[in-house]
Amino acid sequence: MTLSMTMGMTIGVKRSLHFMWGELIGVALVAISSVVGIAAIMLKNPEWFVIFKLMGGAYLLYLGVQMWLSKGKMAMGESSNQLQDSSAFGLASQGFITAIANPKGWAFFIALLPPFISQDLPLVPQVSLLIVMILILEFICLLIYASGGKKLNSLLQKRANVKTMNRIAGSLMMGIAVWLVVA
């Protein structure tokens, strides 16, 4: 999301769409792989599901605390000139690689998706519906971040504002972690 915001700031929302479609393909691959791997484990060893759920909740809690403790820095990757010269395929490749190489994305899907899978129902329709919902929400969020980045460029240059944004996002992460452990 931070990269999407950065791209909105530097190359605009329209050019950022190339990054987004590559990122969505990567997110779909990560989500499918996570669900299939967890489902296989759940079918053979249901007690491992509880362990994964607790570990996922702990990891999300850790991420939330890290966001709270951040000093208000934003991760600005490539410079504006490098992004301006990127081709559509280059931007899409960057989005894909960002999605599949992000360990937080893997951990998030491994922690979040299993509670939504029923062992009593066929796996393919459940996974398909989850993936479609995830991709729609992901695309909407990417658009919001890219648009917001373009509009909030000057506001997000202030460390205190980024710190507040991180605290809100961190609180949400911690809330999801508690929900995972309790549910």
Image (cartoon, rainbow, N blue to C red):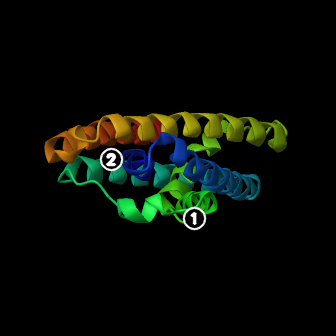
- Residue placed at 53% from the left, 47% from the top? 15
x and y percentages locating residue 54 in the rendered image: 48, 50
Camera-near label (1 vs 2) is 1
x and y percentages locating residue 94 in the rendered image: 55, 62
Find the distance from the CA under tag 1 to the CA under tag 2.
24 Å
- Residue placed at 40% from the left, 38% from the top? 178
Residue closer to the observer: 177 or 78? 78
Tell me if mark 1 has few (under 14), some (14-19) or many (20+) residues whose alpha carbon lies within 10 angstroms of its own.
some
Q: Could you tell whether 15 is left or right of 59 in the image?
A: right
Q: Could you tell whether 103 is left or right of 162 in the image?
A: right
Residue underneath mark 1: 97
| Number of the label disc, if any, that sits on residue 64 | 2
Q: Is label 2 in a helix, a strand or a loop? A: helix
User: Label 1 is placed on what type of residue?
Assistant: Ile
Tell me if mark 2 has few (under 14), some (14-19) or many (20+) residues whose alpha carbon lies within 10 angstroms of its own.
many
Q: Could you tell whether 46 is left or right of 169 in the image?
A: right
Q: Which quadrant of the figure has residue 78? A: bottom left
Q: How many marks?
A: 2
Is residue 124 in sight in this rendering? Answer: yes
- Residue placed at 22% from the left, 38% from the top? 155
Q: Mark 1 or mark 2: which comes first in sequence?
A: 2
Is residue 45 in sight in this rendering? Answer: no
Residue closer to the observer: 100 or 176? 100
Q: Which quadrant of the figure has residue 165? A: top left
Q: Is label 1 in a helix, a strand or a loop? A: helix
User: Label 2 is placed on what type of residue?
Assistant: Gly
x and y percentages locating residue 154 in the rendered image: 22, 40
- Residue placed at 70% from the left, 59% from the top? 37
2 relative to 125, above or below: below
Residue closer to the observer: 47 or 82? 82
